[in-house]
Image (cartoon, rainbow, N blue to C red):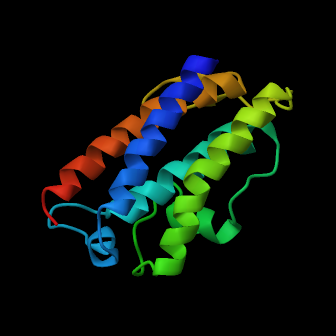
Amino acid sequence: MDTTFNINQTSRTVISKIVENHTLEQLNTIPEGFSNNLIWNIAHVIVVQQMLVYNLSGLPIMVSDDMVAKYKRGTKPEHSVTQEEVDEIKTLLFATLEQTKKDFANNIFKNFTEFTTLSGYTMKTAMDAMEFNNYHEALHTGIMMQIRKFI
């Protein structure tokens, strides 16, 4: 379990540096040939982690319904994100991970609704979801690295 969280901490640190090293305009830019931008990808990984680990466990998530609606699978940027929203996303990047670590340590994940991803991976436990989440975040980190080349 420590390895899973260490990988996620590393992922979130890399993502955090993307936020810190780009202007608000750059974070909001959708390059030609892409369907989203840096900040959408960053918020998306936060929302998906919450949906996979907490929602499938039948537990409340730590992000707003509005955030889920904007950044869940199948969405795309519909507006330019404000600096206030960027600040909230930056905070949630680590706050959600820290709370998830605590919740795993406190063994709150008792139930889980089995779920098969679009890539064909079936999650049967919250830990499976957390491990798959690392794969998902890596995919989106790669997309962010590509977007950076065009903004």
What percent of the width, then of the height, locates residue 64? 69, 66
The quadrant in which residue 92 appears is bottom right
Residue 63 image offset from top left, x and y in percent: 68, 60
Q: Quadrant of the C terminus?
A: bottom left
The answer to whether residue 25 is above or below residue 127 is below
In the rendered image, residue 107, in percent from the top left (x then y), is placed at: 85, 26
Q: Is residue 117 visible?
A: no
Q: Is residue 138 above or below residue 80?
A: above
Q: Is residue 88 above or below residue 25?
A: above
Left or right: 61 as drawn, with respect to 21: right
Of residues 65 and 17, which is closer to you in this image? 17
Kindly indicate the quadrant of the structure image that contains residue 52: top right
Can residue 104 be spotted in the picture?
yes
User: Which residue corresponds to the image point at 36% horizontal and 45% vertical from the top-left?
Assistant: 140
**Residue at x-position 48% and y-position 70%:** 86
- Residue 90 vs residue 60, the one in the foreground: 90
Please provide percent x and percent y for residue 136.
Answer: 44, 37
Residue at the image point whose x is 14% and y is 67% from the top: 32
Residue at 43% over, 52% down: 16
